[in-house]
């Protein structure tokens, strides 16, 4: 009888451990973060759509970053009430779109110098331990000459502490005249 009790208690203990491991894995999965910098309107929508689909499949959250570009002549902590208000409205709109996918979304405004957005994105990604950065960017060079993306996109690619996915969107359609 004592061995039977020992077997039941071990079985219950093993079942409890498995349940705890499963719950821990599920909670760790919920803590993943997908970071989306908001650059261009059309490309950002495509990137946000892609990021929300990935986040809903993986049980992750989305962090939306809106860059506030500060000129070199001004200090980074200069006052920009109107620009920040416009960015907050845009962030609220994009957050509502992300939440329509059933994904938890957080917003943040990042101050950066022109062409140096990568530092701010890298700091935010490291702070929240982002597992992926989804970046919407138009292709500047259709023929492959020079650099195909803007300086901001390259700075994010160079400084990112995690993988970066670039969503370029659908290529523009060129309609040809039929002779």
Image: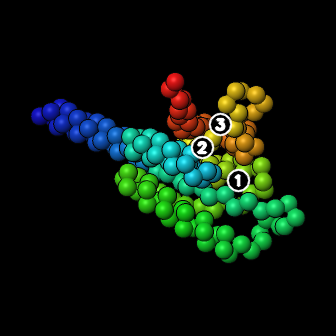
Disc 2: which residue: 135
Which residue sits at x=77%, y=69%? 77
Q: Disc number at residue 89?
A: none
Report the front residue among 135 and 27: 135
Q: Are marks 1 and 3 in contact (CB under 8 Å)?
A: no
Residue found at the very far top of the displayed protein: 179
User: Residue 132: percent from the left, percent from the top?
Assistant: 56, 41
The quadrant of the image that shows the N terminus is: top left
N-term mark: 1 or 3: 1
Q: CA distance from mark 1 to mark 2?
A: 14 Å
Disc 1: which residue: 120
All told, the count of numbered labels is 3
Regarding residue 25, the answer to whether it shows in the image is: no
Asked if residue 65 lies left or right of residue 45, the reply is right
Which residue sits at x=78%, y=56%? 113
Which of pointers 1 and 2 indicates the residue nearer the eye?
Answer: 2
Q: CA distance from mark 1 to mark 3?
A: 22 Å
Q: Tell me the element at label 2.
A: strand
Report the front residue among 82 and 42: 42
Regarding residue 156, the answer to whether it shows in the image is: yes
Which residue sits at x=40%, y=57%? 99
User: Residue 142: percent from the left, percent from the top?
Assistant: 67, 31
Asked if residue 4 lies left or right of residue 175, the reply is left
N-term mark: 1 or 2: 1
Write down the quadrant of residue 69 in the picture: bottom right
Which residue sits at x=37%, y=55%? 100
Q: Is residue 81 above or below residue 92?
A: below
Disc 3: which residue: 139
Q: CA distance from mark 2 to mark 3?
A: 12 Å
């Amino acid at each position: 009888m004592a061995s039977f009790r020992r077997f039941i208690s071990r079985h219950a203990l093993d079942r409890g451990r498995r349940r705890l491991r499963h719950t821990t894995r599920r909670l760790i999965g919920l803590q993943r973060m997908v970071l989306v910098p908001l650059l261009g309107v059309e490309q950002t929508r495509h990137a946000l759509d892609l990021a929300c689909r990935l986040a809903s499949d993986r049980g992750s959250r989305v962090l939306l970053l809106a860059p506030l570009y500060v000129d070199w002549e001004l200090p980074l902590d200069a006052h920009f009430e109107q620009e920040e208000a416009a960015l907050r409205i845009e962030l609220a709109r994009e957050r509502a779109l992300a939440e329509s996918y059933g994904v938890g979304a957080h917003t943040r405004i990042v101050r950066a110098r022109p062409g140096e957005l990568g530092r701010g994105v890298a700091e935010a990604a490291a702070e929240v331990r982002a597992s992926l950065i989804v970046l919407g960017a138009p292709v500047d060079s259709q023929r492959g000459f020079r650099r195909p993306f803007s300086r901001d996109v390259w700075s994010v690619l160079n400084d990112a502490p995690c993988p970066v996915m670039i969503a370029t969107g659908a290529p523009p359609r060129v309609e040809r005249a039929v002779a």
